[in-house]
Image: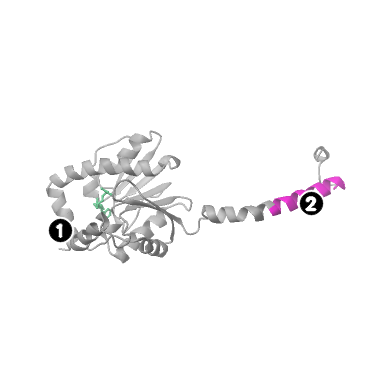
Amino acid sequence: MPRRHALHSHLRQDRRPKRIRDIGTQQLTAAISKAFDFSAYRTIVDVGGGQGQFLAGLLEKFPSYEGILLDQPQVVAGAPDVPRLQKVGGNFFEEVPAGGDLYTLKLVIHDWDVPKAVAILGNVRKAMKPAAKLMLIEGLQKGPEPDFAKWMDIMMMAVTGGEERDEAEYREHLDQAGFVLERAIATEAFPWLHKARDQSWPGWRELTAQVPKLCGQLAKRFTAFRALILFGDPFVPEHHMFI
Ligand SMILES: C[S@@+](CC[C@H](N)C(=O)[O-])C[C@H]1O[C@@H](n2cnc3c(N)ncnc32)[C@H](O)[C@@H]1O
């Protein structure tokens, strides 16, 4: 049996790791919502979201939100019912639910090797509207200093066949799946927030670079329109003559 499958079936039987994980998830949710303003996103899809503890924590904080939880059918079957939270049992290698403004993947990608991680990200991108955003909530390998991400890297390598990535690796995987990494945000806890957008959607830098060009075009149009009015163009209605 592949190692990650053995791990997931063990976790289904032994409830102790779940209790410890629940406490960890509450603390992580607090650290994540302190580091990032989620208020701009109305519908959040948590991909591989376990039994919905993270998503339920966000929905409690933002009462107008809706959440969609995707995980394996046997996992979501045990998830508690939470108002405004829709549970979807499925397989992120096949399909991810559409309709989210923000797609979160918390401690999911680190379970998988590069081709599988890119396949999951590719399916998220297929489900997303171009303006929606992606947030990977994962450890970040940085420099030679000892840190928790390195310990997790060894754990992932040994247990699931996955790994913790550095920023260049996140950029590369995201690029392969059609995303652009916008920024990496530190939290008070171990994971970082890696925020990404669809490659076809312009970011702030691209939009602000367009501003001088747009202003120039507007000014040219306005001057031409005013000249037409002053010279009494027959197609301009009388009531526009005050300009
Ligand atoms: C490391 S856990 C992270 C769970 C949760 N996001 C969290 O941070 O607590 C990885 C999750 O991916 C889910 N998963 C694994 N394979 C999956 C698949 N093919 N489709 C959907 N979910 C899957 C597992 O059931 C598990 O809940």
| Secondary-structure class at tag 2 | helix
Label 2 crowd (10 A; few <14 / some 14-19 / many >=20): few
Principal SS element in the magenta part?
Answer: helix
For the question of whether residue 210 can be seen, the reply is yes
Q: Position of residue 180 (x, y in %)?
A: 44, 59
Q: Position of residue 24 (x, y in %)?
A: 23, 44
Q: Amino acid at mark 2?
A: Ala
In the picture, measured across the screen, residue 99 lies left or right of residue 56, that is right
In the picture, measured across the screen, residue 216 lies left or right of residue 237, that is left
230 versus 5 height, above or below? above
Q: Amino acid at mark 1?
A: Ala
Q: Going 31% across and 40% down the picture, which residue do you hit?
A: 30
**Closer to us: 123 or 189:** 189
Res 224 label: 2
Q: Position of residue 181 (x, y in %)?
A: 43, 57
81 versus 102 height, above or below? above
Quarter of the picture containing the C terminus is top right
The picture quadrant where one finds residue 141 is bottom left
Q: Going 29% across and 36% down the picture, which residue do you hit?
A: 82
The picture quadrant where one finds residue 91 is bottom left
Q: Which residue extends farthest right?
A: 231
| Secondary-structure class at tag 1 | helix
Magenta highlight range: 216-233
Are circles 2 and 1 on residues that touch, CB within 8 Å? no
Q: Position of residue 110 (x, y in %)?
A: 28, 58
Per the image, is 224 magenta?
Answer: yes
Q: Which residue is mark 1?
A: 6
The picture quadrant where one finds residue 38 is top left
Looking at the picture, the colour scheme in use is: one colour
In the picture, measured across the screen, residue 143 lies left or right of residue 129, that is left
Res 60 label: none
Quarter of the picture containing the N terminus is bottom left
